[in-house]
Image (cartoon, rainbow, N blue to C red):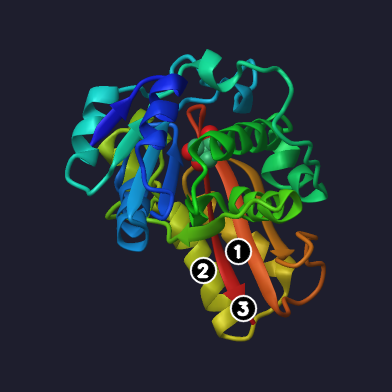
Amino acid sequence: MKVLRSLSDYVCWKKTLSSSKSIGFVPTMGALHDGHLSLVEASTKNAEITVVSIFINPKQFSENEDFNTYPRDLENDLNKLKDYNVSAVFVPSINDIYETEEPAIIFDHPFAQTLEGASRPHFFPGVIDVVSRLFNIVQPNYAHFGRKDAQQLILIQKMVDAADYPITIIPGETVREPGGLAMSSRNEYLTSNQKRELGIIWESLGVAKKMLDNGDLCANRICRAIENTLKKISRLKIDYVSIVDIENLKEVSGDVRGDVLISLAVSVGGVRLIDNIFYAY
Ligand code: PAF
């Protein structure tokens, strides 16, 4: 496993590869957990070469978010990756990625304005910018993104289509803590007790699924049931609970029909957590 700590290291290494070999790419911001590792494993099974990037992208954090305190432990991350058949870990500097100020592509999509985009307007422009820059450098055939960040996954697929990148996006299932909390690097801010208690988030989505399974299709009633479940933890602040049509990301106003994304964002003691399920009715 090569550790490539600069853009020039990556470019030199890439030149040594046979162009016929397929490259799978797993972009990350480090603080690797089993969710990341499941994407890495999928890539090593799917492609001949797997590249993992570790880069905490300042552009996807706002001034009052946790860029400075975001968990960083490169040695630990590299140790975890050693157990997988990873060919290279790319650890660029901020200058390597943002050596040109101009974004790699201009991509502005209405899907970036709802849900996470409404709460964090800086987030998707920052993600799209860094992912397109990373794609241009890494030049993968496949790229892996988790379903926990469902809207990110959808927007990256849209960006790939719009820019005609020859890259297949491969989604990975959300991996959960034993109590159901979706794995996230930000879970490092939580104690084990908090993680267990926050299984309520997954439980609330289970309530929604059960209602739909039982034919209770009213989107408003389902959202209220999710909120009522979440409110069992009084310190938990709800940002949004939403059911959107997967085709247009528009809020379902009446009954749920077709494929929907049920998603929510909450915060506990300043730690922001998101989760979702897809449901096909
Ligand atoms: O999902 C993430 O970890 C980040 O948003 C990504 C895709 C690595 C871009 O910085």
Residue closer to the observer: 81 or 20: 20
Q: Which mark is residue 280?
A: 3
Where in the figure is residue 170, as x and y percent of width and height?
Answer: 49, 60
Horizontally, residue 103 falls left or right of residue 34, namely right
Residue closer to the observer: 197 or 4: 4
Q: Residue at x 28, y 40 (%)?
A: 193
CB within 8 Å, label 1 to label 3: no
Quick one: quadrant of the N terminus? top left
> Which secondary structure, mark 2?
helix
Q: Is residue 33 above or below residue 225?
A: above
Mark 3 Cβ inside 8 Å of ligand 1: no
Q: How many marks overall?
A: 3
CB within 8 Å, label 1 to label 2: yes
Q: Residues within 10 Å of mark 2 (few under 14, many from 20)?
A: some
CB within 8 Å, label 2 to label 3: no
Q: Mark 2 points at which residue?
A: 207
Mark 2 or 3, closer to the camera: 3
Residue closer to the observer: 187 or 123: 123
Sequence order check: which comes first, mark 1 or mark 3?
Answer: 1
